[in-house]
Image (cartoon, coloured by chain):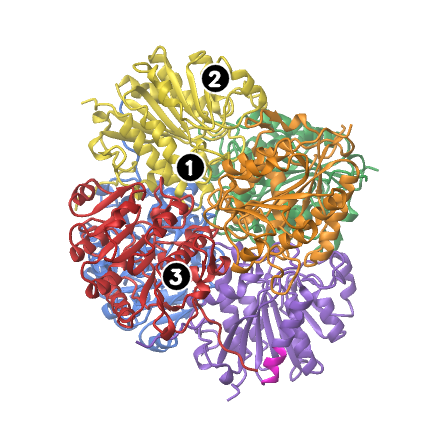
Chain colours: A purple, B blue, C green, D yellow, E red, F orange
Amino acid sequence: MTVTPRPYAFIGCEAPYGEAGTVIFGAPFDSTASFRPGARFAPQAMRVESVGIETYSPYQERCLENLRVFDAGDLDLPFGNAARALDEIERFAAGVLEDGKMPCMIGGEHLVTLGALRAVAAKSRGLHLIHFDAHADLRDDYMGEKLSHATVMRRAWEILGDGRIHQCGIRSGSKDEMDWSGGHVERELFGASRLKDAVCALRGAPLYVSVDLDVIDPSELPGTGTPEAGGMSFKELLDALLSLRGLNVMAFDICELSPHYDQSGRSTALACKALREMLLAFRRPSSR
Amino acid sequence: MTVTPRPYAFIGCEAPYGEAGTVIFGAPFDSTASFRPGARFAPQAMRVESVGIETYSPYQERCLENLRVFDAGDLDLPFGNAARALDEIERFAAGVLEDGKMPCMIGGEHLVTLGALRAVAAKSRGLHLIHFDAHADLRDDYMGEKLSHATVMRRAWEILGDGRIHQCGIRSGSKDEMDWSGGHVERELFGASRLKDAVCALRGAPLYVSVDLDVIDPSELPGTGTPEAGGMSFKELLDALLSLRGLNVMAFDICELSPHYDQSGRSTALACKALREMLLAFRRPSSR
Amino acid sequence: MTVTPRPYAFIGCEAPYGEAGTVIFGAPFDSTASFRPGARFAPQAMRVESVGIETYSPYQERCLENLRVFDAGDLDLPFGNAARALDEIERFAAGVLEDGKMPCMIGGEHLVTLGALRAVAAKSRGLHLIHFDAHADLRDDYMGEKLSHATVMRRAWEILGDGRIHQCGIRSGSKDEMDWSGGHVERELFGASRLKDAVCALRGAPLYVSVDLDVIDPSELPGTGTPEAGGMSFKELLDALLSLRGLNVMAFDICELSPHYDQSGRSTALACKALREMLLAFRRPSSR
Amino acid sequence: MTVTPRPYAFIGCEAPYGEAGTVIFGAPFDSTASFRPGARFAPQAMRVESVGIETYSPYQERCLENLRVFDAGDLDLPFGNAARALDEIERFAAGVLEDGKMPCMIGGEHLVTLGALRAVAAKSRGLHLIHFDAHADLRDDYMGEKLSHATVMRRAWEILGDGRIHQCGIRSGSKDEMDWSGGHVERELFGASRLKDAVCALRGAPLYVSVDLDVIDPSELPGTGTPEAGGMSFKELLDALLSLRGLNVMAFDICELSPHYDQSGRSTALACKALREMLLAFRRPSSR
Amino acid sequence: MTVTPRPYAFIGCEAPYGEAGTVIFGAPFDSTASFRPGARFAPQAMRVESVGIETYSPYQERCLENLRVFDAGDLDLPFGNAARALDEIERFAAGVLEDGKMPCMIGGEHLVTLGALRAVAAKSRGLHLIHFDAHADLRDDYMGEKLSHATVMRRAWEILGDGRIHQCGIRSGSKDEMDWSGGHVERELFGASRLKDAVCALRGAPLYVSVDLDVIDPSELPGTGTPEAGGMSFKELLDALLSLRGLNVMAFDICELSPHYDQSGRSTALACKALREMLLAFRRPSSR
Amino acid sequence: MTVTPRPYAFIGCEAPYGEAGTVIFGAPFDSTASFRPGARFAPQAMRVESVGIETYSPYQERCLENLRVFDAGDLDLPFGNAARALDEIERFAAGVLEDGKMPCMIGGEHLVTLGALRAVAAKSRGLHLIHFDAHADLRDDYMGEKLSHATVMRRAWEILGDGRIHQCGIRSGSKDEMDWSGGHVERELFGASRLKDAVCALRGAPLYVSVDLDVIDPSELPGTGTPEAGGMSFKELLDALLSLRGLNVMAFDICELSPHYDQSGRSTALACKALREMLLAFRRPSSR
């Protein structure tokens, strides 16, 4: 009898690395989470639960099975050492980019974005960041720490500069970070209805798209570390993401799913569906 | 002292069988559920939780206590034998119809609809099916099985024929079943806003109304076997159901509540409220 | 080493009593809850979870830290004795009013409103009550009891008289209480979109604002005793509350959070955010 | 077609009232619970979950189906009014005793025992009470209230007198109630290993057996209002209960299951099994 | 960059098939579960959670990493068709045996044992079955069905004959199946303390070891379909399993973990540990 | 009216700092947790839930109210920076010791023990550590990190030296750490039955007692990060702790409660009871 091991991959993402245009990897790190940790379990949970969705999208009328995606599994990240974890992430994402493929990272807490962003910024001049989030994440430090999921966008700004970060859905922040951001970052409070207009100016520019899932209302996605009432619906997020089709997305991520806080499993199911749509929307011709 | 046993019935549905115009029965079967089972617990859970809602509807300004409904309890269905379970359901529903009453079935997984539909179709020529669901359920087989909750609408189509199935709220399916359906079934993707127009043409025609509760967004109804983000709200479903008032509904069902996946109990509470509204909207003069 | 005990207060509400304009107190009573009890745990849960939100509101562009609020902790209320519990609440609220401060009560079940309302009504002639709720709460008695969370608005009407109670969001009630209310109370079913107009006439009049959190849809707030589908969103409630800014609010409360029914914690987080917005919207210059 | 309503009864307890030797009734009252309420849901939950156990006991080699038990359903008890609730319970239990049958009450919080005990004590001189509990329940008042689940045994002592209450498994109490009990009640701390000896002296005497389920360790029964580590196992409780076989049990109860605090359902399943064993052990020849 | 897919295997079980002495496979079938389904999720959950235990056993002072085990993933079994599912299982287990390796099956409900047992019995004359379970599983049919998790041991007896099934830990059954078993199966009620003696006579005989995890007390393993109070502890089960070391175990399985009924995850963790110990205790020299 | 803020303290621990003999403080840090984080919530959860237990211990016949304990609340520890967090803990514990009081720390993950231990070791020559745990925690590094909850006892050994660490209840570890420990640490596998003998030799020596709550069986304490079957019971742990009475305990801690993983709340309740018993057993005359 010939028996081979079962693949451990997001549904429909079983292409070999060499043939893949997009490469999924998990960044199971949550050591700086300031409220409820557990985002480390997200990539694993999403692979397991992805069997509950179809590979076909009726929104885009496309199927994951016609895309060539490789799922690399999770990186081994050291708990409690943010600097080393970010280095590991940067190194892996750089390797994927080097091979001409698009990195798709599943967090983890939002700080992991910094690692992947560094790798992309190193290759792409003039990079813009489209940022969906309930929280501004623009503090300069958090309890004295520079590397935190509450400071990640400030660190990103240090790399990208003024006017390069476009925030959507923000509905929480300290007075200081809200005041600071004027002139430094673009922001739409509470939703993303103006994104369609904003992206016109970004046509052709290299983009990094980062989704902190707490941008979604906690009714639809309770499984997250810092639930914040008054959020966007899945439909609104999907509309916003689909409005980015045709732009030059270099890499993207989906962060801050904390699956253990949702016994019903629907948070993970929503995250899987969002990832399917992003994979289909931001796809790149395979490297073959 | 004279003491009689407490009735075990959905709230306000304690009429004797002989006097009832509508007959509730549970079909606690979920053996073909492809993802998360547990819909077998729905009818029982709904009876228990129904004390948390009122018998009066402010939407219709009517009260269940002015209706004559009998609750027959649950059928004894053999776990793991879909064919026999469907026969039992068909037999019971046929008996209810024979007595001039309207069957109201509480599933169970969606496959149970096939049993009741057979009974109604046998009595009513030209039957149409109004189908609320997140999933198309139109596969020809599922892992080789013809009887499955993923194939139930294909089996229904074999009975009813082209143009008789009207699907609302669908937002998930394989590419094959989506492609197949053109020409065979009517379908509105993602919602039911066009139903009002569609039903004009159905005035007078015999109807079967089937609600797979996963048509509702998982935020409002997490307790279901295959949660699918981006669904309809309760208000939207209610609007759609109330637009069917005055039509010739022969029978109806409500399926796929899996109560154990919602520790908060609100999924069951929503299902109870939906059932109350359907009982009031599709009522039939009592047989007396 | 000098070490002082940590304050046990809602976030940003650590002013001394003497300097405070608003005084928070908990009324952890739920003995008459007719369906699922547990609202007694709400004030404590809200203090603990309040660290998950910011003190700054991007909706009002104000910060709790610039307000002077004192958190008095919870009253000691006797389980199972509604009359005595109401007396305790009335006595405490009267003391707060006597000192020229605004009482802000965290329930508990909705009956506790009666205690605080008595204290306010004793001081303020012509008091109006703005009442957000899924349930009319207008029964004359419940299972023979006059003091119940299902009768609280009837008792309030006995104090305030016709036309003084303005209900929003109601979507459940018995036929009797719905019929009774015409002529006695003002009511908007299902939402609060007409509140803005109604409040014009209330400018200058003394107001009591009472929020039964089950007015919110159970998808956003599953942690409540009697979840009722088809509710308002947090955004809708917030809009309604903010439309009351500038009116003469004497006291307010937030009731019926039952935190144990929501393992995800988002119900409590929403309640915290609603309370923050109410504190900022209805604030009063400090007594200093 | 002839269809009769399904009985709503504990498994195997469907005898008509007239033919029954034992009568089950629920007392869904929990308004004085001092920590976590919810015992009101116990009788209903136990009926529903009882289908998960067999009617046959391998411990006693007897079957419920050979016993004649009637299940009267739940009494309608007014939330928040302990005195009236106890009167209702007493009245019903007295009726059952009057008809020569044995009352078996499912609580509710432990205070309900007082109602049934009054009825039995009125008929049986020299009544003894066997009391399984984690808590002594001997306070004279609780927050000023005489009627509370924390005072129920003090009230029972006022009826029965010194040396009539035999407590097992106690592992929690205030210093005052622990000190008071010497000379008034018999007590075995932490377990029930000495019960076998104690009951020799009770042969022939009329007995009331009351089980507060929190006597069981919270690992086996987490679904209770005041979990207290270090409890008895189900096996130990069963041994103790079976040691009472052959004694003159007049009535018994099982209290303080709070099913919503155990999502796994095993607390309710254990309570069902304990009730089955008590019904079989304390059975009485039917009244026929 | 060279990147290979992550293995999806039970911890420490990543040997290639050709080199393995033991072969794990999942049988995710639960369509005949009579109470709470969900055992289909067990194999997947156990692989994911196995990272929470060590590969080293301090009980046996051996390490999984020194064993050669291959994990084949889950079989594709048709929901709702027990006969076909058993055929698939039998075919796979027969292939493993044919290759000289030991099958280790993770259920699924207990009926799956029948498939693997058929394969082993076909190769091994005089096969004995060691059966750990809370339930006798000896009904001749269940609601008319011959293939059910409640009848699996009766079907096994039809293959193996009298005196070949050795049951431990049984504490639930109908009167009929309990009566029938005398003369047909060996049984120790409530525990397994006498197993050590029994196995002396089995030295050299071919054995199949089947663990229905509900033999464990629900306090330690709430995540199962039919929790039954009064069970064995993990320590007792482990002692019993280790007493089988040195016997001629041909195949073994572990069934009836239903992970969704235990939000704490400890049921799955216990099952992982039990599987580790069984793999180490019943190991076979690799085929190399 | 005079109103003072409510204390936020473990039940019965409201003495002023100056008068206290024992000082409780929380160390809400869990950034290096290798499996399930969430221990950061433990000190807060224990304060809230402590109202569910009595201040009186029937085991020791003593009452917390007769002890003078101060509860300092939680330290502000930087998420994701283990070295800084340990420094904060060490600094605070040293201050408490300096003032002649006994530190009682509530973790957090087990790494926090290192901070407090450093402070005690700096003051007490010849310090011994009594260590209750399921896991050996003796790795030299974990994924390259020296500071981890999996290495904490190795770091402790570097401070204390050979033969100073006494481990009880260990039932999990890698082969390497198990092999290493011979000659370096004392260890009783699986339980603590031999502790009574061991402590004879420790009479008079300064002791630090550290309880990792996962030493308790997951059935009694599911709310922990790395549940490990086959653990000690609360009764066994209590016996072991009480056997240390009269010894020279300088400081103690209780770690690794992760309350969100136990929806029933019993894990926190058990931890509260264990802490009460430790406070009473290791008490020190107040500084007055």
Q: Which of marks 2 and 1 is nearer the N terminus?
A: 1
Location of mark 1 (residue): D41
Task: Check the image and name the residue furthest to the bottom.
Answer: A288
**Placement of F210 over or under D107, stated as above or below:** below
- Residue F124: image x %, image y %? 74, 42
Q: Position of residue E176 (x, y in %)?
A: 18, 42
Q: Which chain carries label 1?
A: D
Give the magenta-colored segment's residue range: A93-99
Element under label 3?
Answer: helix
Is disc 2 placed on a helix, strand or loop? helix
Q: Quadrant of residue D61?
A: top left
Residue at the location (51% across, 55% down)? A262
Q: Do labels 1 and 3 share a chain?
A: no
Q: Along the line of sight, which residue is nearer the eye, F126 or E242?
A: F126
- Vertical side of F245 occupied by A74: above or below: below
Q: Do the residues labelled 2 and 1 touch (CB within 8 Å)?
A: no
What is the chain identity of the residue bearing mark 3? Answer: E
> Which one is closest to the eye, mark 3 or mark 2?
3
Under circle 1, the secondary element is helix
Marks 3/2: CA distance? 54 Å
Percent across and percent down for residue D175 are 58, 22
As measured in the structure, the alpha-carbon distance from the residue carrying label 1 to the one carrying label 3 is 34 Å
Decide: few, some or many residues near mark 3? Use Cα within 10 Å; few <14, some 14-19, many ≥20: many
The residue sitting at 31% across, 19% down in the picture is D250
